[in-house]
Image (tube, coloured by chain):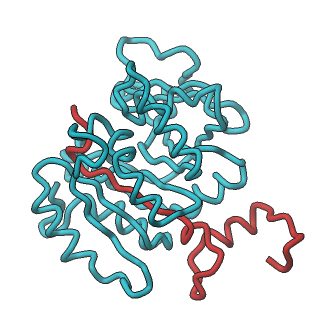
Chain colours: A red, B cyan
Amino acid sequence: MADDHHIPDRDDLLRMARPRADGAGLLTRRTFALVLAEGVAPG
Amino acid sequence: MPFAGKLRIIDFPLSNCVNSGIRYAAVLTQYKAQSLIRHVEHGWGFLAADLGEYIDVVPAQQRVDESWYSGTANAVYQNLELVHEVDPDYVLVLAADHVYKMDFSRILAEHVDKHADATVACIEVPLSDAAGFGVMGVDAQGRVTAFVEKPSGPNLPPGCSARDDRVLASMGIYVFNTAFLYAELERDATDASSSHDFGKDVIPHMVGRHGLFAHRFADSLRQHGWRASLLA
């Protein structure tokens, strides 16, 4: 985003969400995934 | 669950993570996990550990008390320390037994755009398959207004409607704001009536109380229980 006062719109959010080479400011890079293997949930 | 010879179904969610740009993931296991541990360590060890990227396999460790995981939410609750260590803004909870291709950046973008507390990925399934899923009702803004896990009986639960004999079903993929996840799992852990499962307890409890939204996924998904049709 161009400056700190810019309110992100949907396009900005999608851009932020995609991986980029510099790895900065990405939604996915601010996300931790927990994968629940079979057997974690009874039944 | 093996898939196509040397692969396992867990490779699908892990591949989706890496291709979406998610570089920190933990696989929570409980029973008979040795071959899964070996597979993930051998097949997914290419991430740059020196840059803090990793996929860890975490066996059940009875960190909180002496009980094993009593449900999916309890599994995450018993591993909140892992989340604390990473200190992410968002936590993505996935099942290991789904075959699909999904760009998680899209559900994350929608989650942030809607100022959601939590977002559930969903697909339309035939009404006849509803009993195998968490069935949902949503309003025009995508807010979840009803959620019933694996409904029994011939009729749909209140608030869940079918259109053209199709219903909206949860994919068992959840995005949470991290602070909200902590609070909800702490609350659920003290609820004696809960089975500590995301689909049965945590997600239904959020309906009407918190910002729970649905993200519509338009691609294919198969749970491993459908593998016969998958391989046909």
Relative to the observer, which residue lies in front, B73 or A26?
Answer: B73
The image position of residue B44, as x and y in percent, is 27, 75
In which quadrant of the rendered image does the N terminus of chain A lie? bottom right
In which quadrant of the rendered image does the C terminus of chain A lie? top left
The image position of residue B68, as x and y in percent, is 21, 40
The image position of residue B183, as x and y in percent, is 54, 40
Relative to the observer, which residue lies in front, B58 or B123?
Answer: B58
Which residue is depicted at the point 41% across and 78% down?
B53
Relative to the observer, which residue lies in front, B191 or A24?
Answer: B191
Q: Is B202 on the left or on the right of B229, as rendered?
A: right
Q: Is B197 on the left or on the right of B4, as rendered?
A: right
Which quarter of the picture shows residue B194? top left
Which residue is depicted at the point 38% across and 39% down?
B73
Q: Is B223 on the left or on the right of B117, as rendered?
A: left
Q: Is residue B138 above or below residue B96?
A: above
Which residue is depicted at the point 63% across and 44% down?
B117
Which quarter of the picture shows residue A23? bottom right
The image position of residue B181, as x and y in percent, is 52, 45
Q: Is residue B157 above or below residue B229?
A: above
Q: Residue furthest right?
A: A5
Total label count? 0
Which residue is depicted at the point 26% across and 51% down?
A37
